[in-house]
Amino acid sequence: MRFNRQFPIGPCICDFVSRTEKLVIEVDGGQHAVDVAKDEARTAYLQVQGYRVIRFWNNDVLERIEGVVAEIERVLSNRPSPAPSRKREGS
């Protein structure tokens, strides 16, 4: 699975984005605890663009990376299956 770092989606610069999986991973510092409404608006915008957004605190990434990776794997395993092909046999 490929992720791009510091990837722009509209007016947002996202920390990590898997475009094929339509997944945004945000790693937040303490300033995000103060401006919750801004983060909520940003998440809503990204969701309208078709992305799923998951957030982690900096200290979780630095101190509990195994749990962070496990959560990312869980989110990816719960994604919907791709739509079946509409092509008919013999078409």
Image (spheres, rainbow, N blue to C red):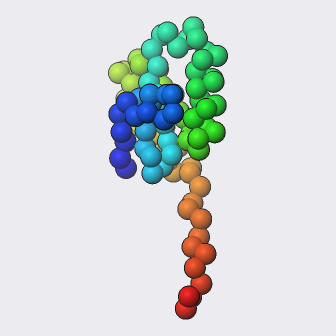
Say if residue 3 shows up in the picture. Answer: yes
Image position, residue 63 (x, y; %): 36, 21
Image position, residue 25 (x, y; %): 46, 33
Q: Nearer the viewer, residue 62 or 16?
A: 16
Image position, residue 58 (x, y; %): 41, 19
Against 13, residue 74 (above or below) is: below
> Which residue is most to the bottom?
90
Q: Is residue 5 left or right of residue 24?
A: left
Against 84, residue 53 (above or below) is: above
Q: Residue at x 63, y 23 (%)?
A: 40
Q: Residue at x 35, y 47 (%)?
A: 2
Which quadrant of the structure image shows residue 82? bottom right
Q: Residue at x 57, y 73 (%)?
A: 85
Q: Nearer the viewer, residue 30 or 17?
A: 17
Q: Is residue 17 left or right of residue 55?
A: left
Q: Number of labelled discs? A: 0
Q: Residue at x 39, y 25 (%)?
A: 61
Image quadrant occupied by the C terminus: bottom right
> Which residue is most to the front?
10
Say if residue 66 shows up in the picture. Answer: no
